[in-house]
Image (spheres, rainbow, N blue to C red):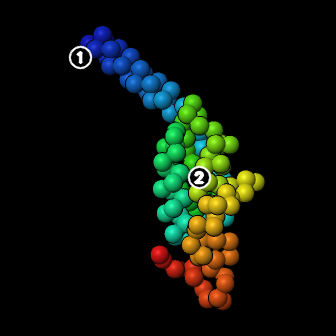
Amino acid sequence: MNKKFFAAVFSALIIVISGYVFAQSDTETITIKTSSQCEMCKKRIEKGMGLEKGVKSAVLNLDNHTLTVVYKKDKTNPEVLRKALSNIGYDADDVAANEKAYKKLPDCCKKGGHDHDGHDHSNHKH
């Protein structure tokens, strides 16, 4: 093979890599402390946040009650994301849960919902 072919392939590879890096730089990641309680909360939060404009992924860690959201920074921002989580019915860092949405949550999804009867609900599935 000749030098021109390798130069063309190398140039094309640089363009592809540059495009990929540029495309990835339009996202940011935020971790939000939530008032989540159980698997039902996890499903509700991940589904609800996944529907928000600009959200690429939303994953809730039930062990530490944190939500990790990858989002397009030109479509949304942390304040909007915290407000969206509040509107689902959960605390989002220092943004309190929307009272109306919180009241609609099942009892097990409310703060201390798995502590009310003295039983261990850590493996409780809904």
Pick out the residue farthest to the left: 1
Pick out the residue farthest to the top: 4
Quadrant holding the N terminus: top left
State how far apart marks 2 and 1 are (Cα): 48 Å
Name the quadrant containing residue 67: bottom right
Q: Is residue 111 left or right of residue 21?
A: right
- Expressed as whole percent of the image width and height from the top left, the position of residue 124 reads 52, 80
Name the amino acid, label 2. Answer: Thr
Q: Is residue 14 above or below residue 63?
A: above
Name the quadrant containing residue 94: bottom right
Could you say which is closer to the camera, residue 60 or residue 3? 60
**Residue wearing tag 2:** 68
Q: Is residue 68 above or below residue 44?
A: above
Determine crowd level at label 2: few under 14, some 14-19, many 20+ residues with C-alpha closer than 10 A: some
The numbered mark, 2 or 1, whose residue comes first in the sequence reads: 1
Pick out the residue farthest to the right: 94
Pick out the residue farthest to the bottom: 118
- Expressed as whole percent of the image width and height from the top left, the position of residue 112 reads 68, 76
Kindly identify the residue that appears in the image at 58 percent across and 66 percent down.
104
**Residue wearing tag 1:** 1
- Expressed as whole percent of the image width and height from the top left, the position of residue 52 reads 52, 45
Kindly identify the residue that appears in the image at 62 percent across and 46 percent down.
81
Q: Is residue 80 left or right of residue 18?
A: right
Name the amino acid, label 1. Answer: Met
